[in-house]
Amino acid sequence: MEKIDLNAYLAGNEYPGRGIAIAMAPDGRQMFIGYFIMGRSANSRNRVFDPLPERGGICTMAADPAKLEDPSLIIYNPVLTLGSTHIVTNGDQTDTIYDAMCRGQSFADALRTRTFEPDGPNWTPRISAVVYAGGSYQMSILKSADGNGDSVQRYFFDYPQPVAGEGHFISTYKCNGSPIPSFEGEPLRFACPRTIGDFARGLWASLNEDNKVSLFARVIDLESGECGDVIYNKYEAVESSLDDPEEPDLLPEEKETEE
């Protein structure tokens, strides 16, 4: 599979929905995780990412609680950390995976208990990924059979030996539409930038300005296991002191490569 320019791909796609990008930095010493959400409706856009430090992740929250219409499918924990395992998904299956792993079960075991979202006619896929100590990772998509809400298809992708400077991207949708067509095929292989700053800023700047809502990025040092996060939120939370989304606090900017 040919490597794509992920930023260019996203810039040319009005509505990929929610997306997960996992990559190994070009120096082979760090892993990058990216997760973004988009929205077409007022309810979907009324969200921010908020840190969840006690669980090593983030949660989605209503930017304005007074305007929240239906919390189902839009309020969840996109990222959780279990020991040295980082879990990222587009729904409450994050907790399903976390709980299953606490019981000694696998990523696939957990997702075999789930299906796509009950939002016909779109039947939004559930996309998920885990990054393990050492940098190996897995991705998955649970989707309907070409829009058939009576048939679930579960796909799993295993990357036990990541390649420095490369990553994989998967999203809920192929593009905008009515109904919205689900993502098709394997996760897209992309060239990874050198720094977490370039990775995060590039993704955020590439998303459609009208539809983008929030973006989370994490850098993981493979030797120490230490990580740092950055959050971009387009909308300001009511009664919140969120930083300006154009100037986020980038917690470690790959110290080893600043020589």
Image (cartoon, grey):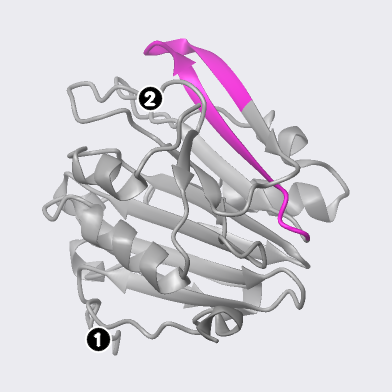
- Specify whether residue 89 is in view: no
Quarter occupied by the C terminus: bottom right
- Name the kind of residue labelled 1 in the image: Glu
79 vs 11: above or below: below
* Image coords of residue 159 (percent x, y): 69, 39
118 vs 74: above or below: above
Q: What number is the disc on residue 191?
A: none
- Specify whether residue 145 is in view: yes
Out of 227 and 109, give the one closest to the viewer: 227
* Image coords of residue 200 (percent x, y): 38, 66
Residue at position x 68%, y 78% in the image: 226
Q: Residues within 10 Å of mark 2 (few under 14, many from 20)?
A: many
Disc 2 + disc 1, Cβ < 8 Å? no
Q: Cα distance, mark 2 to mark 1?
A: 34 Å
- The residue pinned by badge 1 equals 239
Instruction: Report the side of 206 relative to 173 (left or right).
Output: left
Instruction: Report the side of 13 relative to 76 (left or right).
Output: left
Residue at position x 76%, y 66% in the image: 84
Between marks 2 and 1 in the image, the one whose residue lies nearer the viewer: 2
Assess whether residue 146 is covered by the magenta stretch. yes
Q: Quadrant of residue 157?
A: top right
Residue at position x 60%, y 22% in the image: 154
- Name the kind of residue labelled 2 in the image: Trp
- The residue pinned by badge 2 equals 123
Out of 149 and 164, give the one closest to the viewer: 164
256 vs 29: above or below: below
Q: Indicate which disc, 2 or 1, sits on the residue closer to the N terminus.
A: 2
- What is the span of residues highlighted in magenta in the rendered image? 134-155
Assess whether residue 144 is covered by the magenta stretch. yes
Instruction: Report the side of 69 relative to 26 (left or right).
Output: left
* Helix, strand or loop at mark 2: loop
Residue at position x 29%, y 38% in the image: 16
